[in-house]
Image: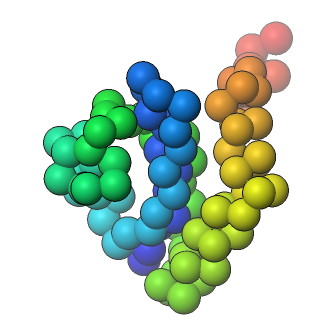
Amino acid sequence: MFYVYALKSVQHDRIYIGLTSNICRRFKEHNLGKTRSTKFYKPWILIYSEKLDTRAEARRQEKKLKTGSGREFLRMLITAPVAHKDRAAVS
């Protein structure tokens, strides 16, 4: 299994998109400053992740998210109100 993920810097207007086979380990590495491209923008929050079967599929999805429309999609996730599936059942 591989994961495509997007992180948002808490203090800066930055989004980082990557792929990994271990999302928990990778997220910790970003927030500990072990990744050169992200260490100056920590702390990070996870805003998107997707599990895919192969590395090739994950790489294709990562490339899509790095396009203008992919980044626009991620920005919409940040600004959109949170919707919960269970909310409809409660009301």
Residue 87 in the image: state x and y as whole percent: 74, 20
Horizontally, is 36 left or right of 81 in the view? left
Residue 24 in view, yes or no = no
Name which residue lies at 74% across and 21% down.
81
What quarter of the picture does the N terminus occupy? bottom left
Q: Disc count in the image?
A: 0
Residue 25 in view, yes or no = yes
Residue 18 in the image: state x and y as whole percent: 46, 63
Name which residue lies at 55% across and 79% down.
59
Horizontally, is 28 left or right of 86 in the view? left
Q: Is residue 55 above or below residue 35?
A: below
Instruction: Work out whether residue 11 or residue 18 is closer to the camera in this orientation and state it.
Output: 11
Name which residue lies at 51% across and 57% down.
17
Instruction: Work out whether residue 62 or residue 55 is closer to the camera in this orientation and state it.
Output: 62
Outermost residue toward the top in this view = 91
Horizontally, is 76 left or right of 47 in the view? right
Q: Quadrant of residue 56?
A: bottom right
Q: Quadrant of residue 40?
A: top left
Residue 12 in the image: state x and y as whole percent: 47, 28
Q: Is residue 76 above or below residue 18?
A: above
What quarter of the picture does the C terminus occupy? top right
Q: Is residue 7 above or below residue 23?
A: above
Name which residue lies at 38% across and 69% down.
20
